[in-house]
Amino acid sequence: MKCMIIGGFLGSGKTTTIKKLVEYLGTQGQRTAIIVNEIGEVGIDGDTFSEGGVETREITNGCVCCTLRISMEYTIKNLITSYHPDTIIIEPTGIAFPRQIKSNIESMGLPDIRFTPIVNLVDPRRLNPDAGDLQNFVRNQIEDAEVLGINKVDLIGPEKLLETCLFLRKLNPKARIVHFSAKQGGEALDNLFCLIRRSSQNKTIHEARNSVEMSGVSAYSTEFEIISQEIPLETVVSVSGQILDGIRNRVTELNPEFTGHIKLSFAHKENFVKGSVTSAYDKSEIEILKKERNSRSRIKILSAVTSVPIEELIKTVDTTVSGQLEDRQLSYIKVEKNDHGYRQVTISPLMQRNF
């Protein structure tokens, strides 16, 4: 069985790349499973992969390279027993240390497991060529990689691409560097897939590092259950965009140079909308996905940003989502744990008036 670790900081395009990779492996007759690791308590990307009929497991509320190592071992062994995949793809959090993940899996004593080269994806628009300003965990991810994939080249010019290549080569002289657009696909992306199907030659490290503590990233995820029955698709799309823009604008006020990723999914009946925003300067990206009829209507939010107090991030997300839903006269329930571990329920004002 092959194990592929595809890392990259928040917003680098891991999910889109992995979706295309699964399709590619399918044409090769490969049975593939995916392990998605989200730093927040609520997972989002797992829904996206499951929508495509792929066997998916989510590991949330931490990082599999340190705090969730036992969960990772259980998940891999369960997949091998129940699903018998030819390939397991691991999408770690954007702050993980990929070589540490590989080292942890090697210590599990799994039979007949082969590793492909560790991949780290980069969004060149968000990579500052001044190495002194580079976050430590971003630098570590680049240095850990055996293949460095410069994604989203359709959004930059040749000068920026050359600058990025030279910068990455300076930080990691040994890695293979490839560039492509996961969204557009094509021959360049296929070349990446051919490259990462080979066996890894690098030895791993056994130094234990806590990626969550080292990252300086505040992370918060939450879920709102929507009670309103009739919501047009255009409202689902509009609300999703307004929520993402509202969170981004407030986070920008708190830290104008924030680095991070804010992700959203809105599932309602036959509609499934996914959106994200990755910086103060980018517009929110909204994608409408095909999905079977949803048994529950819900909005999931995952936010992970640098240098913003966690209390402010929680307040920003909760007030933005509730404010948008109330403006649209949409009833909701939010269930969460309090400091003592008990469930507490927040009910929208519209529902309270109807009681």
Image: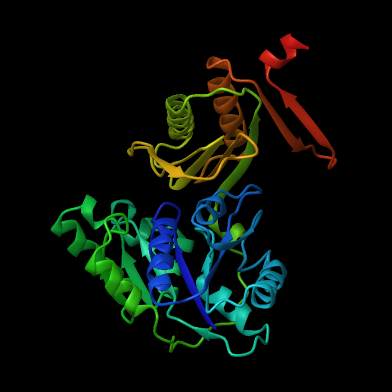
Please count the marks in the image.
0
Question: Is 151 in front, or is 94?
Answer: 151
Side of 318 where 339 appears, left or right: right
Outermost residue on the left side: it is: 158
Side of 252 where 184 appears, left or right: left
Residue at coordinates 73% horizontally, 10% vertically from top-left? 354
Outermost residue on the top side: it is: 353
Task: Name the colouring of the figure.
Answer: rainbow
Residue at coordinates 70% horizontally, 67% vertically from top-left? 71
In the image, is residue 30 above or below residue 160?
below
Question: Is 178 in front, or is 187?
Answer: 187
Residue 111 percent across, percent down from the top left: 64, 89
Side of 195 where 308 appears, left or right: right
> Quarter-wise, where is residue 179 in the image?
bottom left
In the image, is residue 118 above or below residue 349?
below
Is residue 169 in view from this perspective?
Answer: no
> Quarter-wise, where is residue 82 in the image?
bottom right
Residue 291 percent across, percent down from the top left: 50, 45
Residue 126 percent across, percent down from the top left: 33, 52
> Quarter-wise, where is residue 258 in the image?
top left
Tell me the quarter of the image containing the N terminus.
bottom right
In the image, is residue 104 above or below residue 269?
below
Question: Is 261 in front, or is 213?
Answer: 261
Tell me the quarter of the image containing the C terminus.
top right
Is residue 214 in view from this perspective?
Answer: yes
Residue 332 percent across, percent down from the top left: 66, 25
Residue at coordinates 33% horizontally, 79% vertically from top-left? 195
